[in-house]
Amino acid sequence: MFNALTKMKAKGHIEVTGTLGYDISFVRKLPAADGVKLRILTDRPIRFGEAWSDSRSSDYNLSAVELDLKPEKNKSTGTLIPACQFDIDKKTKELGIEDYQNPWKLVDVLDRSKK
């Protein structure tokens, strides 16, 4: 999946305050009862030190985000999995996410695309 994402054209950009952020490779917008839900998947840049040490973390080369955007100010939330990989359960044939780091809970998410 990482190889496919690196070949895709960027659909946008996402960042956590104080970081350079990531280009978004894949995004799906889903309607929700009280707003909109965005599911985002992108390749995670592997830093030099991480690649040089050839640590287990370099196997987790994807990042995933799910945002629940609400029309009210300061009500949007989300979850960020900074390092993950996807696997398919051989018994149930379901797609699963294996995370390397604990997921981050996002609060007060800003939608800067609104005019």
Image: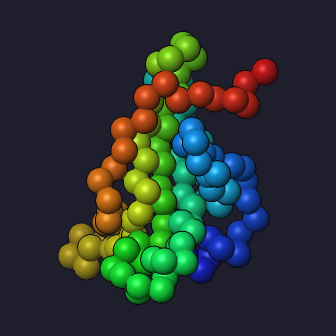
Total numbered circles? 0
Q: Residue furthest right?
A: 115
Q: Say above or below: 72 vs 82.
A: above
Q: Which residue lies furthest to the front in this view?
A: 49
80 and 66: which one is in front?
Answer: 80
User: Does 111 sit left or right of 73 as displayed?
Assistant: right
What residue do we see at 48% from left, 86% from top?
52
User: Does 103 sit left or right of 31 as displayed?
Assistant: left
17 and 39: which one is in front?
Answer: 17
User: Residue 38 lies in what quarter of the image?
Assistant: top right
What residue do we see at 45% from left, 77% from top?
50
What x and y, as percent, mark residue 18?
58, 42
Q: Say above or below: 113 vs 1.
A: above
What residue do we see at 73% from left, 24% from top?
114
What residue do we see at 62% from left, 51% from top?
21
User: Residue 79 lies in what quarter of the image?
Assistant: top left
In the picture, the quarter occupied by the C terminus is: top right
Q: Residue furthest top?
A: 72
What x and y, as percent, mark residue 109?
53, 29
What x and y, as percent, mark residue 96?
32, 64
The answer to whether residue 30 is seen in the rendering is: no
What x and y, as percent, mark residue 86?
39, 70
User: Does 78 sit left or right of 43 as displayed?
Assistant: left
